[in-house]
Each structure stands twice: as C-alpha cells, then as structure tokens.
Amino acid sequence: MLDVTGFKKRHAHRFGADPAVFVAPGRVNLIGEHTDYAGGFVMPAAIDFGTLAAISPRNDGRVIVWSENFHEQVSHQIEGLPKNGGGHWSGYPLGVVRILREAGFAVPPFSLSVQGDVPLGAGLSSSASIEVATALAALSLAQADPPREEIARLCQRAENVYVGASCGIMDQFIACRGAENHALLLDCRSLGYRLAPIPENVSLVIANTMVRHAIAGGEYGIRRGEVEEGTEILRSHRPEIQLLRDATTKDLELWGAEMPENVLRRCRHVITENLRTVAAADALAAGNLKKLGDLMAAAHASYRDDFEASCEEADTMVGAAQRLPGLIGARLTGGGFGGCTVNLVHADRAEAFASRLHNDYRARTGIDAEIYRCHASAAAHAV
Ligand code: ADP
Ligand code: MG
C-alpha cells in the first residue's frame, strides 16, 4: 500500500512546498491481447497497485522530477525539455509534459515527485500509471480538465513518440476510466466502452513469472508488422477492412491462403481474440463464470500457438493454475514473452490457490514467483 501522507510530507520537505497529489492505477488485462492496435477489443481492469504523483509549482522556469523508486532526480528548463526520452525513466513524465504543452495546455514550471508500487516492467503497466498520474498533476497546475479520453490519447502519444514504445491505447485508457469492482470492455477504435461487474466472490490473482525474455521488445514490433501485412492482403479483397478488427474468420477462410503461414496465424489470433473478448464481457455481465473461464483458456492457447507470444514459464504458470481447485480462468496477460499471468479465482479458494500456485511453479521452474492478490479499482484521481 502506498503511504500518501508520508509521500506528501517528503515532497514538501524536498521542494519546500505543499503539493497536490494524484494517483493512477496499473492494470491487468483479463482478455484481448494484441487486439488494441488492430482497432479491436480488450477487457482490462484497473488494479490496486498504482503510481502517486505530487506536484507543486516553481518560479525558476524549471521542471524537476524525482522518482522515489529510482532515488534519482532530473532537472530541465521547461522551455528546453529533451526531444525524446533517451531510454531513461524520466522520459515517461517528461514526455507527458511535452505532449501536453504541444497540445496547448499551459503547464507551468513545477516540481514533481513520483512513487509507484506497480512492479516495473512486469506487464501491469507501471508506464501508463506514471503517465496518467503525471498528466493529472500537470493539468491541475494548468487549471485544465479535458475529457479522460483525451488524457488517455495524449499519454499514449507521449509513450509512442517521446519514449518510443509503440503501445496501443488500452493501458492509458483503463487508468483513466477504470471503475472499482469492474472490468472494462473497450472498443479501441471508437473508444466506446462498457463496464462489466466482477462479482464479489471472484478474486483477481496475478502471478509474476519473474521472467521477461529479451526478445519481447523486438518481437512486439514484428507481430505488429505481421498483423499489418495480413490486414493489407485482406484489404486488397475487401477495401472496407481498414484495421484487422474489420475482418472476419470468413475473410481468413477465403484469402488466408495468400498469406505466409505465420501471418495467417497472427491474424487468426487477432480475429478470434476479438470475438472471445466481446463474448467474455457478455459472460461476465451475465455471471457465467464457466464460459468466461473457457474463453480465457482458449485465449491463452491462441496467444501461445497462433500468436506465439507466450514462453515456457508462462505456459507452466497457466498449466499449474489450471490444475488447482478454485480456478475460473487463467492466461498470460500483457505484451507477451514473460511477465504476469492473470487468474480469476473463487474468492474462498484464493488464498490456498495463491500459495499452491507459488509452490507448484517453484517445483517446476526453480523460480520464486511473486503472487499478487488484487482488487479491481477506481480510475486515476486526486487524493
Ligand atoms: P510496464 O508498463 O509493464 O510496467 P514498461 O517497460 O512499459 O513496463 O514501463 C516501465 C518503465 O516505466 C520503468 O522501467 C520506468 O522507466 C518507468 N516507470 C514506471 N513507474 C515509475 C516510477 N514510479 N518512477 C520512475 N519511472 C517509472
Ligand atoms: Mg508499459
């Protein structure tokens, strides 16, 4: 749990001014992987791990950002912010500030402290959480209150063009629009969404495989390229297919043979994943947990076999979960090649499930996994 009072005091002590404080959540994606940039559907939930941002104005023309996680501070003239993130953590908050200013928000010079308890780089989106917390903080000083959809898009742009990570809109959107005890079905093209309640007797158990394979970043770009290649082939037959989200399994049956085999399988994953994701939201809304679990199992198999974005450790973690009592559904969540699995578990079994999962995974891999019992939580807000 983040200690807001202590955090506020430390900011005041470091910068000599009482701050305004904001928090933005991390997230876990229940289903809908690599569908966001294809204009499709995702169903994440905000979680009770997040990032705090404390902000106070300065009168020396500077932007100073201090991260309690890295124990490091950066300082720039606000008119001379670096042109890109340069691979440094400060690229996330500075990118947001630059993009907000370019978009016309009059963000004045400030001191910012950040502190997060989202595990960094584990696929639970510490990045969107620091971006959105920074955005709310900076916008408060600019005395601006744009719609949450716009904040999400601006933060995504900061990560795309300033940090240089080609992420979709999901992470920033759920940080901006999540709701307590709910998952959110998002149409990544229109940004239309609906909330689906997570029943009280269902627990979110997130299992960190503790591995992140070095290929992850590069393969993400390769998958995006493959999806685009397949989309172009389908578009040449049906010009109304703008994004892969417009294509159907029928289209693949008709023209999939024109694609290289790997491209066909990537496209099949995305097209069927969109169907599964909407069906999962319906199942959750109807309280049909059996159906939801089956869809998560099918989604993991598709991610593993067709999209080839899983890894041995994640498959081991999902396989171990599927043998345990209390499981509703399990799958690898996030960009792939490691990171976390998400498990929906009957609440009365969650504690035993978490400890057995930890033991079973260690017995099979020798790795001590971190297991987090989370709660679907509210969107970013002032604290
Ligand atoms: P994920 O979003 O899955 O956690 P990313 O690689 O997208 O992984 O983003 C993680 C990066 O975000 C960190 O390596 C760091 O650069 C930055 N970041 C996140 N939270 C903080 C924080 N509290 N302080 C400084 N940098 C942070
Ligand atoms: Mg991220």
Image (cartoon, grey):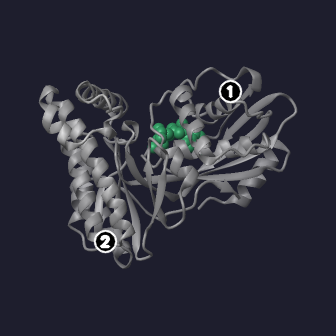
Q: Is residue 285 above or below residue 306?
A: below
Amino acid tagged 2 = Asn
Whether residue 119 appears in this view of the structure is yes
Q: Nearer the viewer, residue 181 or 144?
A: 144
Q: Disc 1 vs disc 2: Cβ atoms closer than 8 Å? A: no
User: Residue drawn at (18%, 31%), measured in percent from left and top?
Assistant: 262
What's the CA distance linking mark 1 and mark 2?
46 Å
Location of residue 314 in the rendering, given as x and y in whole percent from the top left corner: 27, 50
Q: Nearer the viewer, residue 314 or 83?
A: 83
Which residue is labeled 2 in the image? 288
Q: Is residue 40 above or below residue 350?
A: above
Task: Give neighbour class at mark 2: few <14, some 14-19, many 20+ (Cα, 10 Å).
Answer: few
Mark 2 residue element:
loop
Among all residues in the image, which is located at the extreme bottom?
348
Q: Which mark is residue 102?
A: 1
Location of residue 110 in the rendering, given as x and y in whole percent from the top left corner: 78, 37
Left or right of residue 47, residue 271 in this image: left
Q: Which mark is residue 184?
A: none
Q: Nearer the viewer, residue 257 or 263?
A: 257
N-terminal-most mark, 1 or 2: 1
